Image (cartoon, rainbow, N blue to C red):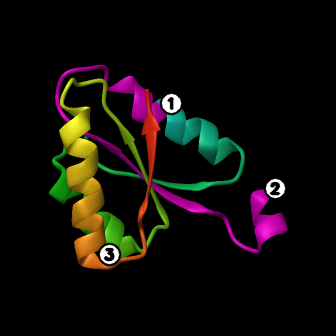
Amino acid sequence: MLKETLGEAPRVRVAKLARMDTIAAPKIIASGFGNIGFEMIAGPLFQSPEEVADPAARSKVPVAGISSLAADHKTLDPQLLETLKAQDCGCLRLARVI
């Protein structure tokens, strides 16, 4: 599908921030996007912004997909973006799963 159209499968790093909500969301999202041709790289659950940014930078993914229903998303999202920018890894897009 996407691989034939783009020449390669789009890569997304999926992560779970905070500890306040369901653990199923990132797995469901990764499965769905994987089914339509994305290469999904799932990280461990309940990570800090720094713990998400480091592997995203190392694997050079263009998109970091995060899942969190925690009330602190207004601070976690900007922290993650700033950490990604500081690492100059090219992963400056953030996809939020609600």
Q: State which tag comes first along the sequence, 3 or 1.
A: 1
- Location of residue 92 (image quadrant): bottom left
Answer yes or no: is residue 44 visible: no
Residue 80, picture quadrant = bottom left
Query: In the shown orientation, is residue 94 left or right of residue 1?
Result: left
- The amino acid type of the residue labelled 1 equals Ile
Amino acid at the residue labelled 2 = Met
Are circles 3 and 1 on residues that touch, CB within 8 Å?
no
Residue 63, image x, y percentages? 48, 59
Circles 3 and 2: CB atoms closer than 8 Å: no
Q: Which residue is mark 1?
A: 28
Q: Residue at x 32, y 75 (%)?
A: 58
Q: CA distance from mark 3 to mark 2?
A: 26 Å
**Residue linked to disc 2:** 1
Question: What span is in magenta?
Answer: 2-27
Q: Position of residue 67 (x, y in %)?
A: 36, 35
Say which mark, if any, is on residue 58: 3
7 relative position to 28: left or right: right
Separation of residues labelled 3 and 1 (CA atoms): 24 Å
